Amino acid sequence: MTAPAERIVIENCAVATVDADGTEYPAGHVVVAGDRIESVGPGPAPAGLDGVVRRVDGTGHLLTPGLVNTHHHFYQWITRGLATDHNLFDWLVALYPTWARIDEGMTHAAAQGSLAMMARGGVTTAMDHHYVFPRGTGDLSGSIIRAAAGMGVRLTLARGSMDRGESDGGLPPDFAVETLDDALAATEETIDKHHDASFGAMTQIAVAPCSPFSVSTELLRQGAELARRKGVRLHTHGSETVEEEQFCRELFGMGPTDYFESTGWLGEDVWMAHCVHMADSDIAAFARTRTGVAHCPSSNARLAAGIARVPDMLAAGVPVGLGVDGTASNESGELHTELRNALLINRLGAHREAALTARQALRLGTYGGARVLGRAEEIGSLEAGKLADLVLWRMDTLAHASIADPVAALVLGAAAPVTLSLVNGRPVVEDGRLVTADEDAIARTTRDEARRLARIAGLSG
């Protein structure tokens, strides 16, 4: 006989379910049974529940789905604060030689730092696009996956690759790239070793050649074929800057979207980071093929890339989620700040005050991200049967207490403290601190690894 699931009851809080109807309760409850959400509704939880191991009084709090990050580069945690006044291409040229010196120890420490910062700020599903694989530096993919497992956070690892070095007209130095065959073989090995296709998986793998200006056409084409043969998703950077569009037109005779379509890189199993410079025809192609977008407003501003046309994408039906992007172009490394920045920056665009609402911003960071990662049936909203990935935000402190609308307070106000964050019904954050890792130890380790990398890069440069 199977033992009844242990239950956690959270009640007396405002609830934003982010379901299809945008259901909200000014005072409601959620019941978690094991790793699933059992019930969501107004008022207190049902009386007489068996197996309740914890009751949380959420008075003064807002309960939302856990945040879902759709684009990141964890390794950049140890190169923050460099090249702070560069555009994308100049920034990449400045940092590639340093990044090409990373090893397994650095990658693991940087992943811990990136994950800890996101988790502490309400992220329950993280994504890492790792594409720098120097020869003979250990199991970098494994080190990232171990870091996420230790943190207790759900992970999509996009196994990246670069095979177009400087001698082939690309941006990365030749010593920082893989061969076509090595990149494809290593990506397939990562899928075979780590990808879990089951409901509730903690680790999934995507195929992720880095960008049009750092990979060959053949790597894009064969990467897409590999992903579809293995049944995994595809990810890359697209239409980030005007320089990228010029590069594509000069090298391929067409813009980025047409180039991606010619290599098999549009489809409902694909999502791309940034997509800042999109014409109406590009947005229509993404909508027609249901290709997803990871919107990274802070990084786009940091690198002066421009303002993505998110309102137009949403109106056309393009799946859109939020991304932190690598912390060498978004030093805060927190996704909940992207809720605010997505709303504010998009209001500087053509749609002005009608660009996005606070609730649309929250949807981008939750359900939108789940949809982009292909996991909308499992996470992204508070609904019975979905995985118990949720966050309880404190809203009764000085920073938020005078804002009557808790969703507006979360999105437009200062970063809200996280009282409780659950992944699979298990606590990851309690009262603003990680319970699965030692934040202070991670801070020391990441500082030491950043200094070690700086020394190596200096000696090698």
Image: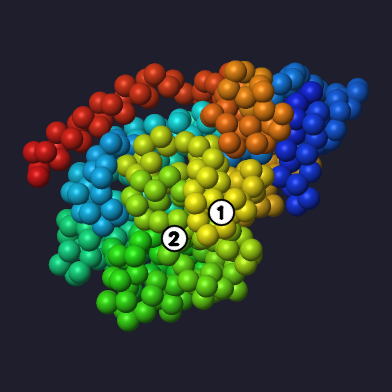
Disc 2 versus disc 1: nearer the observer:
1
Query: Residue 161 location, x and y as percent?
Result: 33, 58
Secondary structure at numbered mark 2:
loop
Residue 231: which numbered mark, if any? none
Image quarter (top left, top right, bottom left or bottom right) of the C terminus: top left
Residue closest to the eye, 81 or 192: 81
Asked where in the image residue 231 lies, by quadrant, the reply is bottom right
For mark 2, does the 10 Å Cα neighbourhood hold few (<14), some (14 to 19), or many (20 or more) residues?
many
Name the kind of residue labelled 1 in the image. Arg
Q: Name the residue type under label 2.
A: Val
Residue that numbered label 1 is attached to: 352
Q: Which residue is mark 2?
A: 276
Q: Residue furthest bottom?
A: 253
Question: For this view, does 381 lie left or right of residue 89?
Answer: right
Please state the horizontal and vertical placement of residue 131, each as a whole percent of the image.
Answer: 33, 53
Where is residue 64 drawn, in percent x and y? 68, 36
Q: Residue at left 46%, top 50%?
A: 296
